[in-house]
Image (cartoon, grey):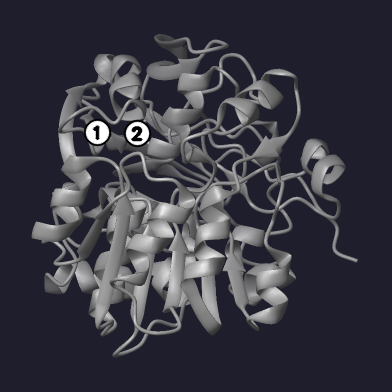
Amino acid sequence: MEYVKRFTGGTHFPPETPTSLDRMKAITWQGGKKLVLESVKRPKILDSRDAIVRVSLCAIDGAFASQIATGDIPHMEKGQILGREAVGIIEERGKDVMKFSSGDRVVISFVIACGTCSYCKREEYSGCNCTNESKEFAAKYGGWAPAAVFGSSRMYSSVPGSQAEFVRVPFADLNCYKVPEDMSFTKALLVGDTVTTGYYAAELGAVKKGDTVVIWGLGPVGLMAADCCKLRGAKDVITIDRNTDRLKMAYEKYKCKVVDRGDKSSSQLLQTLEGVLPPGGADVVIDACGALSPQTWLLQMEKKMGMDKEQSDVLRECFTAVRKYGTVVIVGEYSGFADDFPIGHVMMKHLTIKAGRCPVQKYWNAVMKLIASGELDPTELLTNRVEFDELPDAYAHVANRETGYMKAYAKLETP
């Protein structure tokens, strides 16, 4: 059996550029819905494989913003530094960091992998066995915890996030990727999560030329998934949402067919889909909204009572709309239990289900090549640039899906 070891130990390697700064600005969670900008200790090298990155741009994750808006973030520690999407410049590095030097421009993966465990050797980086010792995860799901995640809860090892002037990146050779000098930071910003997760959704679905794909949820990941399905040759990509701005973007920029969910019930939505799907159903369906889909009053009551329940309407719709021997891809966030899970559909329709967080490091090269060639343009998703000290307020705008808000990000002016 593999031994799950801490990745915070090790020796300190003196910085290549000495500095007297020991404090920095960061966005932290203070319980409930409260986010603040505060002064915290600047990170230090704790392991010879660490790097300290001076953050240039950081973005808000929409799924996490929606979770913040509920005030319900299980296992999150007060004072946690938030953020999991960032680009920046290597400020200092441990002596065993071989791929990077001080001054290199990098994008950071949101999942933290070691590169040497059996999972990493199979390129299953989001399942890394050596960066997360969460007892909460083992108690809830059984087995060993998957890879740690920046800016998250004890479930994912409470690693300080990247909405800060500096961030420590463990196993930097694997968890950072060099941004080409001729590529802007704005183009690379979302490669560490959003863009690569969208690419991963199309990859999991094995989307091919002539396929019909249906995508639930037109957040940044859903839109990137749509774009990547198109690049793989899908004949039709049908997208579902109730936000008119996002439907318009899917139609105009990504040339998708769109279905306005509005106040439609599941049966009404499926009836609408029958009119646009080929006989028998879609080849691939993608759930890119997960537990963020609108919740019934009963589910809201169950959550208030402490029951670990998730909405299952979208899942049932996915399993109904897909054809026999089709593929269901789930990249939307789920963490609890979904009642009425359509297990009968899986058996009787011979379905394949693929799900999980993206092993970003596996797809660095492919995604960066698509951006460099102009085939993917993530900057279309960056709708709102805010000042760094405005990020706490921007979380609410993103969570509420306000008009014009797709992806908010901030530029840091670090001394």
- Quarter of the image holding residue 101? bottom left
- Quarter of the image holding residue 341? bottom right
The amino acid on which the numbered mark 2 sits, given as a three-letter code, is Ile
Q: Is residue 309 visible?
A: yes
Q: Which mark is residue 57?
A: none
- Name which residue lies at 58% across and 64% down: 355
| In this view, 260 is above or below 371 | above
Task: Locate residue 231, reporting x and y percent.
Answer: 24, 78
| In this view, 271 is above or below 397 | below
| In this view, 118 is above or below 359 | below
Q: Which mark is residue 60?
A: 2
Say which quadrant the N terminus sits in.
bottom right
Mark 2 residue element:
loop
Say which quadrant the C terminus sits in.
top left
- Name which residue lies at 25% across and 77% down: 236
Cα distance in 3D space between marks 2 and 1: 6 Å
Outermost residue on the right side: it is 1
Task: Locate residue 372, reporting x and y percent.
Answer: 16, 69
Mark 1 residue element:
strand
Q: Is residue 379 visible?
A: no
Q: Residues within 10 Å of mark 2 (few under 14, many from 20)?
A: many
Tell me which numbered mark, 2 or 1, is placed earlier along the sequence.
Answer: 2
Q: Which residue is mark 1?
A: 409
305 horizontally vs 153: left or right: right
Q: Residues within 10 Å of mark 1 (few under 14, many from 20)?
A: many
- Name which residue lies at 62% across and 46% down: 148
Task: Locate residue 60, reporting x and y percent.
Answer: 35, 34
Observer-nearest of 223 and 269: 269
178 horizontally vs 385: left or right: right
- Whether tag 2 and tag 1 are in contact, CB under 8 A, the answer is yes
The amino acid on which the numbered mark 1 sits, given as a three-letter code, is Tyr
| In this view, 105 is above or below 196 | above
